Image: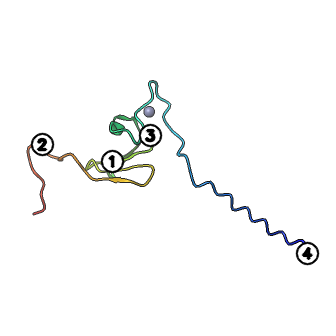
Amino acid sequence: MNTASSRGTDTTSQRKIPSMCQHQPPCPSADSPDREAAHPVAYHPEQGWSLLCNGVLLFEDTGELLPDGQIIAPHRPLAPGRMVTAA
Ligand SMILES: [Zn+2]
């Protein structure tokens, strides 16, 4: 019996996110603390987010979503000198 049971479960679990950055010098990568300095490649102010060329999704409240799924909480007050605390 020659059952073709060679299952090609060859899923390489390390999906490299292709860098969209074409800038010179290259922008900070998504795992760099400087990641917000990358250039926006897509800007959607009506939805409140922009996509940086290093794959970081930057929200207008300064929250971030990294390409690996990590979420960075907003870290900058919207109005300078005014603490926006939960009322
Ligand atoms: Zn770039």
Q: Which mark is residue 54?
A: 3
Q: Distance between the residues labelled 1 and 2?
A: 20 Å
Q: Which residue is located at x 14 percent, y 46 percent?
A: 79
The amino acid type, in three-letter code, at marker 4 is: Met
The amino acid type, in three-letter code, at marker 2 is: Pro
Whether disc 1's CB lies below 8 Å from ligand 1 is answered no
For ligand 1, the image quadrant comes to top left
Residue 82 in the image, given as x and y percentages of width and height: 9, 48
Residue 1 in the image, given as x and y percentages of width and height: 91, 75
Residue 66 in the image, given as x and y percentages of width and height: 40, 49
Q: Distance between the residues labelled 3 and 1?
A: 19 Å
Name the secondary structure under disc 2: loop
Q: Which of marks 1 and 2 is nearer the N terminus?
A: 1
Q: Distance between the residues labelled 3 and 4?
A: 52 Å
Whether disc 4's CB lies below 8 Å from ligand 1 is answered no
Q: How far apart are marks 2 and 4 (CA)?
A: 75 Å
* Residue placed most toward the observer, 33 or 45: 33
Can residue 47 be seen here? The reply is no
Name the secondary structure under disc 3: loop
Look at mark 4 in the image and give the residue it sits on.
1
Q: Do labels 1 and 2 touch, CB within 8 Å? A: no
Q: Do labels 3 and 4 touch, CB within 8 Å? A: no
Given the current orientation, which residue lies at the most extreme top position?
Answer: 24
Whether disc 2's CB lies below 8 Å from ligand 1 is answered no
Whether disc 3's CB lies below 8 Å from ligand 1 is answered yes
Look at mark 2 in the image and give the residue it sits on.
80
Name the secondary structure under disc 4: loop
Given the current orientation, which residue lies at the most extreme front position?
Answer: 1
